[in-house]
Image (spheres, rainbow, N blue to C red):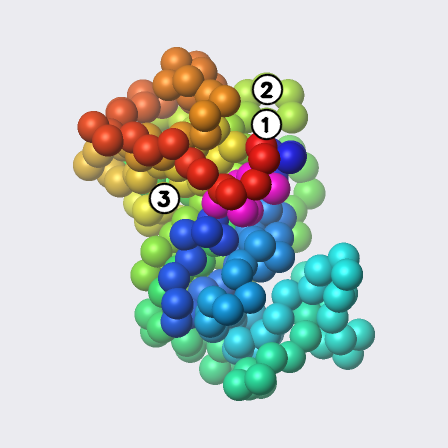
């Protein structure tokens, strides 16, 4: 199982019935592939689709329906189509329970940087800043390190911020963390193939350990 798959599977496992959620690009987008078929979620898409189905390799979706980065999606019974202004009014008005976003960096102050890498072309911050300040919970899905081995959980972000003090939880291939400006990163669940020492070594910021850290059980082999 790849790192990205185990992160997506764990997030899908933690979704709850009836939640109004928004999945960002990258790892978050694949969460929809692992949600239990009988779990009713209201998945919202910035262009203006509510309660849509996410494409999978076996069922890529409707060629006439696209999401915010032009991937195919499909309509579900009970879904609806709205204009983009109404869609962002939902986000800015606090009607999204959770947003799951990828990140380039997250720091111990619950800041997130996910829209540009200094020195590289950037297409714009997009809807991420609206989701970060409008959603009830901001969940980050990311690997612990960059492709070059640099840590992504930091004392202080060095990239331009998307939003400050908003991240509530971080899911990685090693474990799950709560984060707040008051407490920093707190490890609450971990995968069995990583030790607490491994996790601390992969982060730049201090990792606090919850008193009752749980072992993650995905129900499938790692």
Residue depicted at 39% across the width and 67% down the height: 17
Query: Which of these two is toward me, 192 or 8?
Result: 192
Residue depicted at 29% across the width and 30% down the height: 213
Crowdedness of circle 2 by 10 Å Cα count: few (<14), some, many (20+)? few
Where disc 3 sits, the SS reads strand
Name the outermost residue toward the right: 63
In this rendering, the label closer to the viewer, 3 or 2: 3
Residue 107: x percent and y percent? 38, 33
**What span is colored magenta in the figure?**
5-10
Residue linked to disc 3: 169
Q: Is residue 147 above or below residue 22?
A: above
Q: Is residue 81 visible?
A: yes
> Which of the numbered marks, if any, corresponds to residue 149?
2
Q: Alpha-carbon distance for marks 2 and 1?
A: 5 Å
In this rendering, the label closer to the viewer, 1 or 3: 3
Q: Is residue 185 above or below residue 47?
A: above
Crowdedness of circle 1 by 10 Å Cα count: few (<14), some, many (20+)? few
The answer to whether mark 2 and mark 1 are in CB contact below 8 A is: yes
Q: Is residue 185 visible?
A: no
Residue linked to disc 1: 146
Quadrant hosting residue 132: bottom left
Q: Is residue 59 above or below residue 11?
A: below
Residue 221: x percent and y percent? 58, 35
């Amino acid at each position: 199982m790849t790192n990205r798959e185990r992160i997506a599977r764990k997030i899908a496992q933690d979704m709850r019935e009836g939640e109004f959620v928004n999945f960002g690009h990258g790892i978050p987008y694949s969460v929809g592939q692992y949600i239990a078929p009988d779990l009713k979620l209201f998945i919202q898409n910035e262009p203006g689709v509510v309660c849509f189905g996410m494409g999978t390799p076996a069922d890529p979706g409707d060629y006439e329906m696209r999401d915010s980065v032009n991937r195919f999606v499909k309509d579900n019974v009970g879904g609806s189509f709205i204009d983009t202004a109404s869609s962002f009014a939902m986000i800015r008005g606090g009607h999204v329970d959770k947003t799951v976003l990828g990140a380039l960096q997250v720091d111990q102050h619950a800041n997130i940087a996910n829209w540009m890498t200094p020195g590289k072309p950037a297409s714009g911050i997009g809807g991420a800043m609206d989701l970060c300040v409008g959603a009830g919970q901001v969940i980050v899905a990311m690997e612990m390190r960059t492709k070059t081995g640099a840590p992504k959980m930091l004392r202080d972000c060095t990239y331009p911020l998307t939003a400050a003090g908003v991240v509530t939880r971080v899911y990685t291939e090693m474990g799950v963390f709560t984060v707040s400006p008051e407490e920093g990163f707190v490890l609450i669940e971990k995968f069995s193939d990583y030790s607490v020492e491994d996790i601390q070594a992969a982060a730049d910021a201090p990792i606090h350990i919850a008193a009752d850290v749980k072992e993650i059980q995905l129900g499938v082999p790692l």
